Amino acid sequence: MKIPIHRSNNKVIAGVIAGLSEHFNWNTNLVRILFILLAITPLFPGIIAYLVLWILMESPVN
């Protein structure tokens, strides 16, 4: 099962955060910083969320 959001070719690791920010027309760098801040808090399992999104999101469109 895939979600209809594509990972981005503008990637740092896998293009997940860039793909989400491009889909919603958000600033990519701001979303990356926000994700890092949330990922280091103990209440948000950022690594697990990133891996799940990596699996569920479609491959980048070339």
Image (cartoon, rainbow, N blue to C red):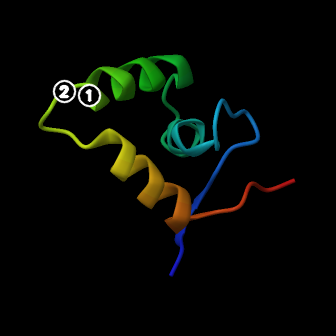
Q: Position of residue 8 (x, y in %)?
A: 69, 44
Residue under pointer 2: 41
Q: Secondary structure at mark 1?
A: helix
Dot 2 and dot 1 residues touching (CB under 8 Å): yes
Which residue: 20% across, 39% down?
44
Q: In the image, is 27 to the left or to the right of 46?
A: right
The amino acid at mark 2 is Thr
The amino acid at mark 1 is Leu
Q: Position of residue 45 (x, y in %)?
A: 25, 43
Most foreground residue, 2 or 13: 13
Q: Position of residue 62 (x, y in %)?
A: 87, 53
Which of the 4 image quadrants contains residue 13? top right
Q: Position of residue 11 (x, y in %)?
A: 69, 34
Most foreground residue, 55 or 8: 55
Whether 12 is drawn above or below 50: the answer is: above
Q: In the image, is 51 to the left or to the right of 16?
A: left
Q: Secondary structure at mark 2?
A: loop
Residue under pointer 1: 38
